[in-house]
Image: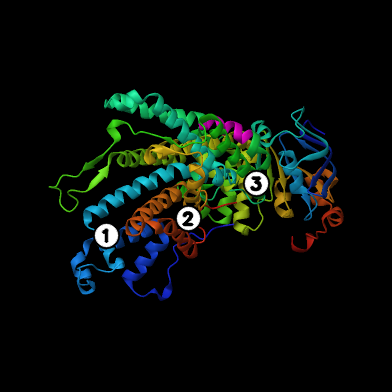
Amino acid sequence: MADALLELTGLHANIGQYHILHGVDLQVPRGELTVLLGRNGAGKSTTLRTIMGLTQVSRGQVRFNGEDITGEATPRVARRGVAFVPEDMGIFQLLTVRENMELAAASGPMDPARLDWVQQLFPPLKRFWDKPAGNLSGGQKQMLAIARAIIEPRELLLVDEPTKGLAPSIINDLRDAFRELKEREATILLVEQNFNFARALGQSVAVMDDGRIVHTGRMAALAEDEALQQQLLGLSLGAHQ
Amino acid sequence: MTADTSTATDPAAGRGLRRRLSAFREGYPHFFLLGLLAGVTLLLAVVPYGIIAAPWQDAAGEAPRLVRLFRMDIQTWFTLTVSGMAMGLLIFIMSSGMTLTFGLMNVLNLAHGGFISFGAFCGATVVAALSGWGGSGSLVLTAGLLLLAFVYAMVVTGALGVFFERVVIRPVYGNHLKQILVTIGGSIILVQLIQVIWGSTDIPVSRPELLRGAVIINEGVPLIGGAAIEIYRLMAVVVGLILYGVMQLIINRTKIGVLIRAGVENTEMVEIHGYRIRMLFLAVFVAGSALAGLGGAMWGMYEQIVNAHMGEHLMIMVIVVIILGGLGSVTGCFYGAILVGLINLYVGYLEPRLAGVATVGLMVAVLMWRPQGLIPVLRH
């Protein structure tokens, strides 16, 4: 496998008394979009939260850029260039769109050229720039959440189910945005349940079940192998393709 | 979780004016209440006493007690209103720190009163040590004395806040019951510490020469001519308003302010963006402690006496203010404090023994109407 930007080895994590991750081994290749698939409760979100230092690692190791970052505090992980868009998006509802973005630009004022690019990627943000983010629609909030994550150059984007609960037309907008991001930007680790969305974007893929990685490989290979899809995800996409 | 801030209008509210009034009441509950309070009392002042008292007077020309309450004129009303604002702004200074620590850190610091007392004693110490400056009648020396007293009180309570956050608060983040227990303990220690340092007797605080007495508004001024306003209260109004302005500026116009407001909504998300929330907590706690100290020093000079337990007594008003303002909201705290100050003065003028009851009554009434407080804060 190519040079891995992020490497999880034998990662165990607990939430309260529940043992969620049972030894996750995952390599995220630099410069690629990796999709993490799996059914509900497989531990996808917990994996992302553990990388961010939001959930305690009980065993195992997280290596980022060759350095051991296991158990590092969240702000330090963030300062290393890891951006995280959680499942609930974590929009600051009372802050304006502008303030949300200013906050996300942690190392100083926003770079105007980059801001232009982000606003062009997500036009509604410009329209509601000085409005409270709480007034945005679900899809616009997701755009804002991703915009916040990319307002500064990052090395790794962790995005948790960006398509959840969104209308198909907005999902298409998001897919286009991710395509552009993929070409221009850093490495992305995307957690997704929407297989069509995942297939359109993913280069490499990992499938989780029961707190472990049960399959890794190229997305192209998985997309062609319906038997494997059936086995891993219980999907029969052929019917409506 | 979202608090209901919508300007809900009752569809059966009828036409135009009534609907607009109810929209105003729900959209700007703080202005509505302030207007109501000041308006009703002004009405009491405007209606000539003679008209109301006439049918009730007995042979000696005395009306029953309740009717005599109407014996307020506009000058008195004006004096009461300005004094109420002064008291309200002093309470605001003391409460703002507590509402901030609650809003951002979700910490109920019941030792806040201890910081108020501590600040009051620090202020009193400076005033006593530099009594020559205060007695001089010189504007420069008086201003210097006040500045020193206030800054000293803020520095000492701020430093105490650093220690307190590390030792007392940090282990109990996220657990209200433990916070209540441990901060009440902390409060007892602070009061004992005061008694160790300054002794257990009350200490009189003499106001500087220039701040004694009152200004009388020129008789030529229509309506309020002749009304007397204590100079110290005027100063309290000015300092309180400046402080409110500065706080609003910091909270609404600076990056620190953005972080504080963001942290009130969702601390985890602030950390995800690379900020060390613990540092922000510490900074806000220290600022809150320093504000308690400033408020205490100003209150001591207002009452002209300081007592180790004064902070505990003031805590009742502080807690009323932050609850009725909407926990965590500085703006709500500001208007809540002014409301409490005004109602204290108005009711206290009519019947002094009812002032305390009115304060709590106001809170109860507001909470029945708006359980989330005047200006609620959205909370994650």
Which residue is identified by label 1? Answer: B42
Q: Which mark is residue B324?
A: 2
Residue B35 x, y percent position in the rendering: 33, 58
Q: What secondary structure prevails in the magenta region?
A: helix
Mark 3 and mark 2: Cα distance apart in space: 23 Å
Residue range in magenta is B157-166
CA neighbours of label 2 inside 10 A, class few (<14), some (14 to 19), many (20+): many
Q: Amino acid at mark 2?
A: Leu
Q: Amino acid at mark 3?
A: Leu
Residue B192 shown left or right of residue B368 in the figure: right
Which image quadrant is residue B236 in? top left
Q: Nearer the viewer, residue B317 or B330?
A: B317
Q: Which mark is residue A10?
A: none
Whether residue B63 can be seen here:
yes
Q: Amino acid at mark 1?
A: Leu
Q: Residue at x 56, y 31 (%)?
A: B196
